[in-house]
Structures are given as C-alpha cells and as structure tokens.
Image (tube, rainbow, N blue to C red):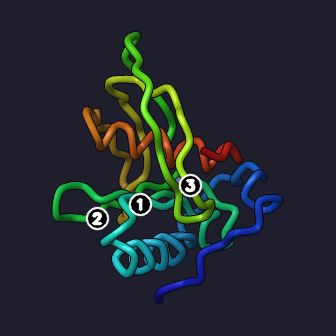
Amino acid sequence: MVRNIMKDLLFLRQKAEPAAKEDIAIAENLLDTLRFHREHCVGMAANMIGERKAIMAIADGNRLTAMLNPEVVKKSPRTYKTSEGCLSIPGEREVERHDWIEIKYRDMDWHKEKRKFTGFEAEIVQHELDHLEGKLV
Ligand SMILES: [Zn+2]
C-alpha cells in the first residue's frame, strides 16, 4: 500500500524504535511507497511514511531492497562531501559520507543478513540510517 509522505519535522526528528517481525507489513508499505516515488527518490526510511520503526528501503540497481533493524558493522575511514535532497524536506543540503559502509539487518523473511554497500548505494544507506536516528539532511 502506498502511504503518504510524512513532512512533520518534529515527528521526523524522533529516533526510530527497533522493528519486530510483525513490522514486515510496514516494510512492504515502504517498498510500495518507494516504488511509487521511484522516479525522483532512491531510498526511504519508515518514519517518512509515519512509522517510527527501524526499517529502510533503497533502490538497488533495478530492484528495491528493504532492510529491518539495520546496524552499522564497519565504514570506510575515508569520507567525502556531497549534497543530498530528501522527499520529506525541500532543497538540498551538504553532508559528509563514507566511501563504503557495511551493515547487518533482517531481510523480508526475517533472516539475518550482512552486506557491504559502495558508491551511490552506500550514500543512500547512510542517508536512510540518519533518518532512523532522527537526523535530517
Ligand atoms: Zn531523506
């Protein structure tokens, strides 16, 4: 189900709670909503659809991948500066990102996964991790 985009900054500044297995339904909504906005959006966090749960979805080539309870395992020592936009806030802002990031998470079958992201995908993952911490870019 495609959900409305949350634009309330007070809500978006709250940290997400850990997701439970039942929250896979929220992850499905998040994937539907990202698919709907895919032309101008590459990733979404659950708080962007009004759910304060640690769930994010990213565009991964032609596929969309949802990750529940993502946690950083490792990130590159090297960082770079870039500017990012967000569906929830107008405009673009400058941020510092790591070259790559490795995270562990639960997939849509609630299996434990670990994956390293590089390049643009790593940037998307870091943007969505910020959302889950209540940090807005
Ligand atoms: Zn955003």
Does 94 sit above or below residue 105? above
* Of pointers 2 and 3, the one earlier in the residue sequence: 2
Residue 127 image position (x, y, % from top left): 50, 44
Instruction: Give residue 8's quadrant in the image.
Output: bottom right
Q: Which residue is mark 1?
A: 57
Q: Along the line of sight, which residue is nearer the eye, 6 or 69?
A: 6
Q: Amino acid at mark 2?
A: Leu
Which residue corresponds to the image point at 39% horizontal and 61% vertical from the top-left? 66
Which residue corresponds to the image point at 48% horizontal and 57% vertical from the top-left? 56
Evaluate if marks 2 and 1 touch, with contact meaning CB atoms under 8 Å apart.
yes
Evaluate if marks 2 and 3 touch, with contact meaning CB atoms under 8 Å apart.
no
Does 55 sit above or below residue 32? above
Q: Amino acid at mark 3?
A: Gly
Q: Which residue is mark 2?
A: 64
Q: Which residue is mark 3?
A: 91
- Classify mark 1: residues with Cα within 10 Å, few (<14), some (14-19) or many (20+): many
Q: Quadrant of the C terminus?
A: top right
User: Is disc 3 placed on a helix, strand or loop?
Assistant: strand
Q: Amino acid at mark 1?
A: Ala
